[in-house]
Amino acid sequence: MSSLDIVRLFGGLVANGAKVYVIALPDEPISEKVKELNELGEASGDVSSKEAIADIAAYIKQRETHLDVLVSNAGIRRDPVEPCNVLTAPLLELQSSMWSSRHSDWADTFCVNTTAHYFMSVAFLPLLSAAAERNLDGGRKGRDDGRGVIVITSSCASMHNMTNIDLTSYASSKAATDHLVRLLAAKFSRFYVRVAGINPGFVPSKMNPIGEEGNVFSSLFDQVPAKRVGDEEDIAGAVIYLTSRAGAYIDGISLCVDGGRILLANGQQSDFNVNDLQELAAGLGIEIASDQDAKDYLLLLRSLEAVMQQIKDGPDYLHPALEPYPVVGIRKYWKPNQDENPFNAWSHRCDLKAKESTSDLLMGRTIAIKDNICVGGLPTTLGTLPTVLSESGVFPISTVDAIVVSRILAAGATIKGSSTCESFCASPLSFTSATGPVHNALLHGYTSGGSSSGSCALVAGSVLNRQSKKVFGETAELAIGSDQAGSVRIPACFSGIYGLKPTFGLIPYTGAASMNPMIDHLGPIASTLDDIAALLKVMAGYDGLDPRMTPESPLIAQVKDYPQILGDFRHSVSTKDGQTRQMKIGFLKESFDIPGISSEVREKVQQTARSAFAVVGAEMIDISIPMHLEGPTIWTASTRLSMSDWLCQEKPSGHLSYLPPHMQARWPPSQEKFDALTSTNPGVANIILSAEFAKKNIGPALEAKAHRKVFELRAAYDDALEHVDVLITPCAPTVAMPHPPLTDSQGKKSTILEKLGVAVGLTNNTCPFNVTGHPALSVPCGFSTVPEHPDAPLPIGMQIIGKLWDDESVIMAAALFEEGRNDGHNPLLSTLGQNKGEE
């Protein structure tokens, strides 16, 4: 017997002639209640053991020939020794609280809440059957009037998932009791001994002392749609219904008597109250003056909360296109050792090859995937610490293959691992990864560029391994990177290889971590143009999932055959085919005068490009686009204010999109997370602060204006490209520089500006084309040296920009440039004999 007021609950039955037996737990002080009932009937008993239940049944059988109603109302609750608010407690506090539960508490809970009902029902089955078979007046049987029925009390806790305290053992036992009702009803059906359940909500009991101070559920009472707690009459009414003629046709069901509590949030009790609502409104500078208005808005917001809880509690959906591509053997990964990872360019190693390929475009080629692009079965680190991404302190394991990953496997490539990227991909240099700096393959201790730092170092390293007798660890012939401001092109430039940012929407971004949907690009990285063309053909094409793709994005079957186009163009150039159209090359004047550009880079790009294009007879003109100098400002204004939403909070865009289910950011940022970001990459912390600053001090109107300026900037480039086939700019304004020191000689940490200052201006020529979407390719153009290492030439990169959806002209212009240099290939390949990854 639970601690409902049994006098109020059953006194009416006794008063009207019924004989009531009250059976209690050994520790329940029911003597006073029994005394009150004994004035009307009699009571005794203990339900805590099978033997005691047998004694009770024998005792009553000696006195009764039948039992019309058995109300089995046993229940206890054993909370964890260390309580916590399960809705708000941090992971470790929640774990500690749950672990404090004793095994004996679970055993006792199930013994009373479930097992006692079973043995009580079985013990009284003959008496209940006798009641059901009794002959009544008019030829009726007892069962026709509802006699011979068991009413088992469960709880609405069995029908929901969570409350503000830990009811796990209690709710589990009650869920078992609900199923027990159905099992017993089925087993007793031959005798039509009915079994029904009652699932009360908030009703007065020892477990729920209504009206007493300190009641842990008190904050939830006003959330019940009935706007009150239940009472004994509510329960008694349900009992009378189930045990009377009115309920004689009810069997094997459980009746929830909870005032509608589980309707709103399936048990997810909201802590959001009127005070929270007013605080929310005050944050917007408004006040909800009317109590009725506040009450109505509160209900609406709680309804939203309930809807979102329903989504949270339901199963996730894995789109078939993102299911990990079938590979040979089991997907497994490992951390590389220092010998195979001298550049610190690998995040995790693996060896994935498709069971069956659908083409041979990349057959046998090795490839690295940037560590913000999902590879099923591998961790996704985003170049940061595990505690920043996960409360468990463990990197999330990808459950999906990004679209480009599946396409690469299908084309026959072997994925050798995930490549190190900069922290949240938010640096054009290579010192911010949580695993340490990524070193330039050509000069240890120097930047490889970012944020696709590992991808470019590995590809450059593969060239070193082929050209040098020295082994530079495990490398990859090809790589994939992401580019939001130059993150493919800048490291390709510093590494002396090719890196393409394709036309926006040509390659699907699905399955990669976003920085801002407006500027997200995935692009190929390779040491030869042929590989760039092959990767582009494999990766490009509409996927039906990425909202970045437009009606102009080609279907897979309509993707241009870039390798064939490149091959045909090279043939026409080498044979001086008169049918080949002469290319017109535009040198973007403003790009050679950006702040911070070195004279060596300016002169090398100008001289080398003009000389090479002149050799092959290309027409060259200088072209001015004054607005190009505004490009970095427009990039910042149009992306920075909301960048935190995508980069740090992993929000979906306003368009339907499929975000990787395993990547769920910790938000809002804890102090620990903020400190970790400040230590490794304060640029990310700045993005978080910028968003909050913008909300309070700038507003969306200026961001919208910045977006309109993007259209203006795009039009300026489009107008120029009406007069030329491609534009030429320097890529990075300098050659690679040393990693900035994180501490000085006395061990003092570098300041935030000391860390960020070295990157200022590096993307001035690259980021404008991320917002406008034009294709842009970093092309190795030559070398320069630094005073500290005069014998170690470092690469200089030229950038070629083309019309939207005319990526092939960009590749052809690069091929024309190569032909004009009289070597027909990447200059890195002929320079490595002088510079073999010096340390």
Image (spheres, rainbow, N blue to C red):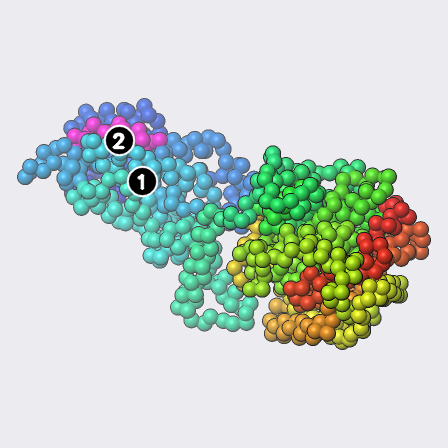
Q: Which mark is residue 153?
A: 1
Is there a contact, CB below 8 Å, between mark 2 and mark 1? no
Q: Residue at x 73, y 65 (%)?
A: 579
Magenta-span inclusion, residue 121: yes
Q: Quadrant of the N terminus?
A: top left
What are the residue bounds of the magenta stretch? 115-131
Q: Residue at x 77, y 50 (%)?
A: 527
Label 1 sits on what residue type? Answer: Thr
Disc 1 packing (10 Å; few <14; some 14–19; many ≥20): many
On the picture, is 95 further left or further right than 503?
left
Q: Which residue is mark 2?
A: 187
Disc with the residue nearer the chain's start (2 vs 1)? 1
Q: Nearer the viewer, residue 70 or 502?
A: 502
Secondary element at image label 2: helix
Q: Residue at x 26, y 35 (%)?
A: 185
Identify the image quadrant of residue 425: bottom right
Secondary structure, magenta segment, majority class: helix
Q: Residue at x 51, y 43 (%)?
A: 83
Q: Position of residue 478 (x, y in %)?
A: 72, 47
